[in-house]
Amino acid sequence: MRILHTMIRVGDLDRSLRFYTEVLGMRLLRRQEYPEGRFTLAFVGFGPEAEQAAIELTYNWGVERYEPGTAFGHIALEVEDAYAACAEIRRRGGRVVREAGPMKHGVTVIAFVEDPDGYRIELIQAKPH
């Protein structure tokens, strides 16, 4: 078994696609319209779905806003340098909500950014090998 994808609902698919591709550097892997169901699915990720997990962005036509809820935590991404990643994300128009630095009660360097719908993405700095 392996993880295939995580699905989140978004209020503006084009805005979300710009964030995940232009700000975070993912690729649009596939997109499918479902006119009878009045929704669109777009899958984004860093590599082919056969090799890596993806994020499914679900846009229900006519729904402009969702509340992330209290049960959802965050999506985590490994980065080489969390400080540099924050600077680049900010340069690309992204919103950093927790600057890079050691995690509370630990030494791992983390940061948090927020997507246009308010979903949190944790950046975890890779440990030296």
Image (spheres, rainbow, N blue to C red):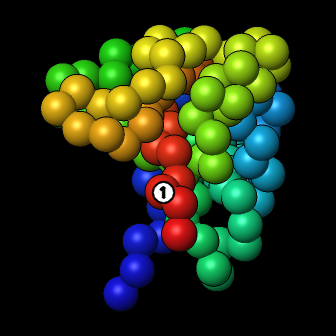
Q: Quadrant of the N terminus?
A: bottom left
> On the rendered structure, is 82 left or right of 17?
left
Q: Position of residue 126 (x, y in %)?
A: 52, 54
Q: Nearer the viewer, residue 97 or 5?
A: 97
Write the residue at 43% across / 37% down.
109
Q: Position of residue 29 (x, y in %)?
A: 76, 59
Name the element at disc 1.
loop
Write the residue at 34% across / 23% down.
68
Write the residue at 36% across / 36% down.
74
Write the residue at 56% across / 15% down.
96
Rendered position, 22 above or below 89? below
> On the rendered structure, is 76 left or right of 50?
left
- Numbered-mark total: 1
Q: Quadrant of residue 70?
A: top left
Q: Amino acid at mark 1?
A: Lys
Rendered position, 117 above or below 33? above
Q: Is residue 117 visible?
A: no
Q: Is residue 96 visible?
A: yes
Rendered position, 105 above or below 44? above
Q: Nearer the viewer, residue 54 or 128?
A: 128
Q: Position of residue 95 (x, y in %)?
A: 60, 12
Q: Which residue position is annotated with label 1?
A: 127
Q: Position of residue 43 (x, y in %)?
A: 65, 53
> On the rendered structure, is 23 left or right of 81?
right
Q: Nearer the viewer, residue 93 or 105?
A: 105
Q: Quadrant of residue 15?
A: top right
Neighbor class of circle 1 (other Cα within 10 Å; few <14, some 14-19, many 20+) is few
Q: Quadrant of residue 89?
A: top right
